[in-house]
């Protein structure tokens, strides 16, 4: 498994990146760039707006194709679904993925190492982009959105690392000598760095991406992540304000039809990544199965049973396989299993439903009961449910968390909700015999600690 230090040695990264496809495969054809006859250098990439955009597109592709955000069995959606109470493991015993399900992750776990190295690889790439732009002859107007996207992606990746590992290095340079000896920062400082990146990014980013497909970061994406960060930090007013800026944007509209939420042209999608051209989303390939028992994972039966009667999400977003005696359930948000044989779908990373929940929760904490109810009811009504009966702040927060569970399942939110709200032990201990309070954080990968002892100490319990 490659390590963060291996990636940080790639000081000539932009050279090799410019020799790749230089486009996010599966995007609009006009994003594909023909290379000049002479070999591009890192500096020459940023002499031209087209090649600079293409270099950044490759960063998106790498985020799509590598952990932690790939939709395959080594991705965050499946592994954290197993770690929480969403998914049940059916794969072969003794594998690294089973360790997530039974809460027996060791520092040597290869999938855990993939989260760390994949995220820091992409962070390195973001920093390389920012370095290239700093000396680029491009105009300020040409540079601004590219810089904003790189800053957003850097903050986005660090957000997940901080929530997985706690104190982390916040990497802002490609200098190998510095990064090889980097120390972990307190989580609060990492969050402050994320916020600083995002506040600058949202001033530079466009309201809508040029292809019009929400496949690149925009102001809405930056404000979505800010609203989430402020919620996690319990800064309720700032969280509500950031969420409102997204919800009042003319770029997005609330889709009333559940079947349209995950189509590529869904009006409530804030940020999504297209699959490789000619293929389907990896989430559809990974989650959907046709015969039982499931090959890897299926939804926990207790989760399926927790939906209210009449909740349309339980029928539209959950598929079932039966052998006549037993039923198994799978996430069915992504429905297209063959290219051209169903609606076009991209991998959704941010959508309006989360932002509505964020504002509802923040409003409840601020004492805006009617506002929180209105937000929550918007989601419930689309699912065919009656308005909430919760009418106090505490009741509303409980109802919002339950609604998040049923709306956002297998999208990577459930584990973080349990963790940030202090619910992990009470929810998981009864169903996870190996649960320990130290499981709130994953272990730092063993190889990273060996290469850089400054990352010590290891997280407690490992």
Image (spheres, rainbow, N blue to C red):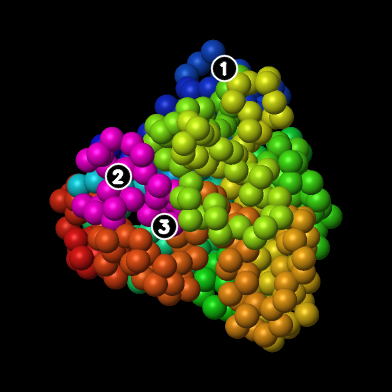
| Residue 22 is covered by the magenta coloring | no
Residue at label 1?
36
Mark with earlier residue (1, 3): 1
- Please tell me which residue is depicted at 49% across the width and 23% down the height of the picture: 20
Residue at label 2?
98
| Residue 97 is covered by the magenta coloring | yes
Mark with earlier residue (2, 1): 1
Q: Position of residue 182 (x, y in %)?
A: 28, 58
Q: Which mark is residue 84?
A: 3
- Please tell me which residue is depicted at 48% across the width and 46% down the height of the picture: 299
Furthest toward the right, the residue is 250
- Circle 2 crowding by C-alpha within 10 Å: few under 14, some 14–19, many from 20: many
Mark with earlier residue (3, 2): 3
- Please tell me which residue is depicted at 75% across the width and 61% down the height of the picture: 385
- Circle 3 crowding by C-alpha within 10 Å: few under 14, some 14–19, many from 20: many
Q: Report the side of 334 relative to 252 (left or right).
A: left
Furthest toward the front, the residue is 325
Q: Nearer the viewer, residue 271 or 199?
A: 271
Does the residue at mark 1 contact the one at mark 3 (Cβ under 8 Å)? no
Write the start and end of the magenta stretch as one range: 79-107
Q: How far apart in space, not on screen, are marks 3 and 2 (Cα)?
A: 13 Å
Which quarter shows the N terminus? top left
Q: Position of residue 168 (x, y in %)?
A: 34, 62
- The answer to whether residue 34 shows anywhere in this view is yes
Is disc 2 placed on a helix, strand or loop?
A: helix
Q: Position of residue 369 (x, y in %)?
A: 73, 82
Where, by quadrant of the figure, is residue 363 drawn? bottom right
Is disc 3 placed on a helix, strand or loop?
A: loop
Does the residue at mark 2 contact the one at mark 1 (Cβ under 8 Å)? no
Relative to residue 22, is residue 348 depicted above or below? Answer: below
The mark closer to the camera, 2 or 1, is: 2
């Amino acid at each position: 498994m490659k390590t963060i230090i291996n990636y940080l040695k790639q000081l000539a990264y932009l050279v090799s990146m410019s020799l790749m496809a230089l486009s996010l495969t599966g995007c609009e054809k006009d994003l594909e760039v023909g290379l000049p006859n002479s070999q591009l250098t890192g500096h020459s990439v940023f002499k031209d707006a087209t090649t600079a955009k293409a270099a950044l597109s490759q960063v998106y592709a790498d985020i799509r194709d590598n952990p932690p955000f790939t939709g395959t069995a080594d991705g965050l959606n499946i592994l954290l679904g197993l770690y929480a109470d969403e998914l049940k493991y059916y794969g072969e015993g003794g594998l690294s993925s089973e360790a997530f399900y039974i809460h027996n992750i060791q520092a040597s776990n290869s999938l855990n190492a993939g989260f760390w190295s994949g995220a820091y690889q992409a962070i390195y790439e973001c920093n390389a982009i920012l370095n290239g732009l700093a000396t680029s002859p491009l105009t300020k107007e040409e540079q601004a959105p590219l810089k904003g996207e790189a800053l957003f992606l850097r903050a986005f990746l660090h957000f997940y690392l901080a929530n997985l590992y706690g104190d982390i290095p916040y990497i802002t340079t490609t200098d190998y000598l510095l990064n090889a000896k980097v120390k972990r920062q307190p989580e609060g400082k990492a969050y402050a760095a994320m916020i600083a990146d995002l506040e600058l990014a949202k001033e530079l980013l466009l309201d809508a991406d040029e292809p019009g497909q929400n496949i690149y970061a925009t102001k809405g994406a930056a404000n979505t992540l800010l609203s989430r960060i402020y919620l996690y930090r319990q800064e309720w007013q700032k969280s509500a304000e950031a969420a409102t800026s997204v919800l009042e944007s003319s770029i997005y509209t609330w889709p009333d039809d559940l079947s349209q939420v995950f189509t590529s042209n869904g009006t409530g999608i804030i940020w999504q990544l297209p699959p490789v051209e000619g293929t389907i989303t990896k989430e559809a390939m990974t989650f959907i199965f046709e015969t039982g028992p499931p090959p890897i994972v299926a939804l926990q039966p207790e989760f399926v049973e927790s939906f209210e009667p009449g909740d349309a999400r339980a029928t539209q977003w959950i598929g079932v396989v039966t052998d006549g005696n037993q039923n198994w359930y799978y996430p069915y948000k992504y429905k297209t299993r063959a290219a051209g044989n169903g609606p076009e779908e991209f991998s959704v990373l941010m959508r309006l439903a989360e932002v509505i929940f964020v504002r509802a929760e923040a409003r409840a904490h601020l004492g805006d009961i009617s506002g929180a109810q209105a937000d929550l009811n918007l989601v419930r009504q689309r699912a065919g449910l009656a308005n909430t009966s919760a009418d106090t702040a505490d009741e509303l927060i409980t109802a919002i968390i339950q609604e998040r569970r049923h709306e956002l399942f297998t999208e990577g939110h459930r584990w973080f909700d349990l963790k940030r709200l202090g619910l992990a032990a009470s929810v998981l201990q009864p169903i996870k015999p190996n649960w320990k309070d130290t499981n709130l954080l994953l272990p730092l990968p063993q190889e990273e600690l060996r290469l850089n002892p400054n990352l010590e100490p290891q997280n407690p319990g490992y």
